[in-house]
Amino acid sequence: MRTTSTLKILINSFALLAILFSYSCKTGLQNGNTNSGWNQADLIISNIIVPKFQDRTFNVMDYGAKADAEFNNSEAFKKAIAACNESGGGKVLVPSGKYLTGPIHLKSNVNFHVEEGAEILFTKDKSAYLPMVHTSYEGMELMNYSPLIYAYGQKNIAVTGKGVFNGQANNENWWNWVGKDEYGYKEGMPKQTDEENLPRLRKMIADGVPIKDRKFGEGYLLRPTFFEPFECENILVQGVTFTNAPFWILHPIKSNNITIDGVTVRSHGPNNDGCDPEYSKNVHIKNSIFDTGDDCIAIKSGRNNDGRRVGIPSENIVIENCEMADGHGGVVMGSEISAGVRNVFVRNCRMDSPNLDRAIRIKTNTIRGGFVENIYVKDIIVGQVKEAVLKINTHYGIYDNQEGDYIPSIKNIFLENVTVENGGEYGILIKGREQDPVKNIVLKNVSIKTTKTPVKIENCEPIKFINTTINGQEF
């Protein structure tokens, strides 16, 4: 009875949330008053379930672990996690030291806790990441190498502590597969864009091949993600550091109730996005540092036909008190965005690096399609960016043939109390579509001290400027 009552309360809360979002987007964004919207950010946070664990500790040393950076601890970690799970949950403790391992598969009610001074070194032996698991690559589901830390269909899981997860990716391990000289690729080497790799996966999806038959893994060159909870609930990542990632770093997919708190991501390899919630909802990212080789935070919802097949938008995402350094974008929506993104809140963040391309970015095209709506950005300090403070691009494409029949919809984007020292090439850069122009962009109390081109827009309804100055000129 209590469970049913709680469920009804949650359902009613989120129904109310949807109504209030609709109201705030019709009225608040248009007149510059976003208080009702920001109240919803607090409601989202209050409704997120943060996992709690039994007061029991399972020390990996008791299961045969060795902290010598040479012994493979895969079996010891597996046994400790299984014992913790089977007993009803608790903490799997990794003491100070260096631990070599294969992939770590989390189970329900397990907090994998890595103490300060502990470093997990993921093996360079790619066979260790087999057998294949159900995972995703650039917004496309497939059977592939296991992510370095993986959970499938689990509930109440955590990775915590002050330790380091080192993927050991570099120009000789994983990165050279991308096929770029700066990542160790040399002419004649195989690469992920060869016909049997990414093009084969894209064709399978276009042809409607079932996921179980999209088999890659050994002999193919699609890199694994670092931390991937897949169809999980109640997830906590707290305090730890991730470095030297093969591919995307924090990738909750089809998951609910996600808290990322006090995490440091420093990884400069190809496609080293810091955090990519995909088909996920009720996400709280706070107090974290992102210094990456790609987007710092990129909110996604599947690529092309696969995204439309799944049809789960990413929504109710709050990002606060974070620092963004190097990266292609600070907070980004896309480009794998075919199922849509809505209700994203970014506040009290600092973005600053000569190697940070944009602060806020939305990217899609008419093959990806999708929608982006209800994006609130407030109390942001930007030191410098290369290209733009706000960039919206509905013509995004790094591959050929990016034109299709799925016109993106982008509306209700609000920036408030944003201070920028150096806005780079553009203050605001928007390239929409004539069939469905970008709608309802509001800038309030925004100051961009220097930029080469204040505003460049195409196929966008007139931006509403409230107390906004660019290059000392009021707009």
Image (tube, helix red, strand yellow):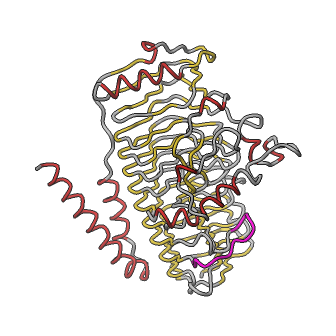
Left or right: residue 475 compared with residue 355:
left
Looking at the image, the residue that sits furthest to the left is 1
Provide residue 474's location: percent of width, then percent of height.
Answer: 60, 80
Provide residue 430's location: percent of width, then percent of height.
Answer: 64, 76
Please tell me which residue is depicted at 54% across the width and 13% down the height of the picture.
66
Of residues 127 and 417, which is closer to you in this image?
127
Of residues 367 and 235, which is closer to you in this image?
367
Rendered position, 80 above or below 174: above
Provide residue 331's location: percent of width, then percent of height.
Answer: 56, 59
Left or right: residue 169 compared with residue 132:
right
Of residues 278 and 326, which is closer to you in this image?
278
Count of marks, rendered view: 0
Of residues 296 and 278, which is closer to you in this image?
278
Please tell me which residue is depicted at 58% across the width and 66% down the height of the picture.
304
Q: Is residue 72 magenta?
A: no
Quarter where residue 110 is shown: top left
Looking at the image, the residue that sits furthest to the right is 187
Magenta span: predominant SS is loop
Rendered position, 283 above or below 333: above
Q: Is residue 403 magenta?
A: yes
Provide residue 43's location: percent of width, then percent of height.
Answer: 31, 59
Which span is picked out in magenta? 397-407
Quarter where residue 24 is shown: bottom left
Rendered position, 203 above or below 36: above
Quadrant containing the C terminus is: bottom right
